[in-house]
Image (tube, rainbow, N blue to C red):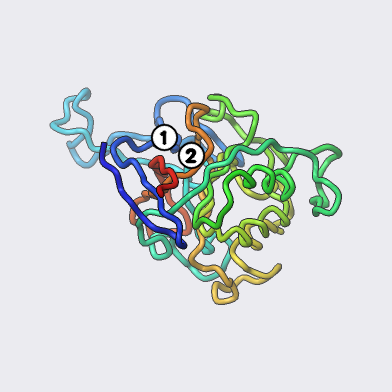
Amino acid sequence: MSELLLSVGGRRFAADLSDPLSIAVPVDFDGVQPNHFGARRAHARALEAGGFVGDVRAGGSVNCEVLELTPHCNGTHTECVGHVTSDRISVHEVLRGGLHLARLVSVRAEPAPPGETRDPEALDGEPVVSARSLGEALRPLPGPSEALVLRTLPNDASKLGRRYHGGAPAPYLTPEAAALLLTEGVRHLVCDLPSIDRAQDHGRLAAHRVFWGLPAGAQRAHDAARRDATVTELAWIAPTIRDGWYLLDLQLPAFMSDAAPSRPLLYPARPHD
């Protein structure tokens, strides 16, 4: 076992680096995929140029594929504040790499409780991730931590290929839950939701804006108080991965885009005396 000892905020942890746990949904270009917002499937085709064909099965010398995908809709992806600003901020510029101390918690969605903001479009009983339920899940793991991995319950393998259609096809965060993340020191949120906001909310994106510190209606990146924060959506956190402490490695390609496909890796960690 390869073990790393580290100190964060006066607390010591030991992390096992020998067996990382991927919580990304593999993008299967020919198989089952999750899908959000009615986007086209992620697709791969052989490159054809002149007499060249990039498929050994079709007589080519090598395999060379053209990949087509929508990062926000076709699988696990990490996004930055450029998702909601007129300034073209890329996630590659925001996320420079490194390991982040993370807590993993499981939360059961519930109708918005008293005192928490209910989306104006919400139907009666529509499930959300509330500040109340999130706070209860975090209580056994007192923070702060720079990252949070959020698993919603119930949790099963259908999330690997679920098609999210309609106004609220999955739970989403209340603004108060997003604000709690700030209180807990979270700058990198990883969740299994297709979006931390309601799919159809007339562009309010309240939870995204709270998390990035961007006032309602603002569209310039310099108005965001937390430009270095990231949101990762459509992760798959298998039931075999326990709630607790981890190191998070957010891996993504160097795309100059507001979002990119990503592979979050978790390394189990434990408090170390």
Query: Residue 127: image x %, image y %?
Result: 75, 38
Answer with left or right where residue 93 lies relative to residue 240. left
Answer with left or right where residue 20 lies relative to residue 216. left
Q: Nearer the viewer, residue 46 or 198?
A: 198
Answer with left or right where residue 260 lies relative to residue 191. left
Under tag 2, what secondary structure?
loop
The residue at 44%/47% (across/down) is: 271
The residue at 47%/54% (across/down) is: 259
The residue at 54%/59% (across/down) is: 83
The residue at 68%/48% (across/down) is: 135
In this rendering, the count of numbered labels is 2
Q: Residues within 10 Å of mark 2 (few under 14, many from 20)?
A: many
Query: Residue 111: image x %, image y %?
Result: 80, 40
Q: Are marks 2 and 1 in contact (CB under 8 Å)?
A: yes
Q: Residue furthest bottom?
A: 222
Name the image quarter holding the N terminus.
top left
Q: Residue 221 is drawn in which quadrant?
A: bottom right
Q: Which mark is residue 262?
A: none
Mark 2 or mark 1: which comes first in sequence?
A: 1
Q: Is residue 176 above or below residue 89?
A: above
Q: What's the amino acid at mark 2?
A: Gly
Q: Residue furthest front?
A: 273
Q: Residues within 10 Å of mark 1 (few under 14, many from 20)?
A: many
Q: Is residue 227 above or below residue 169?
A: below
Alpha carbons under labels 2 and 1: distance apart: 6 Å
Query: Residue 5: image x %, image y %?
Result: 33, 51
Q: Residue 15 is drawn in which quadrant?
A: top left
Under tag 1, what secondary structure?
loop
According to the picture, the residue beneath numbered tag 1 turns out to be: 27
Q: What's the amino acid at mark 1?
A: Val
According to the picture, the residue beneath numbered tag 2 turns out to be: 75
Q: Is residue 179 above or below residue 24?
A: below
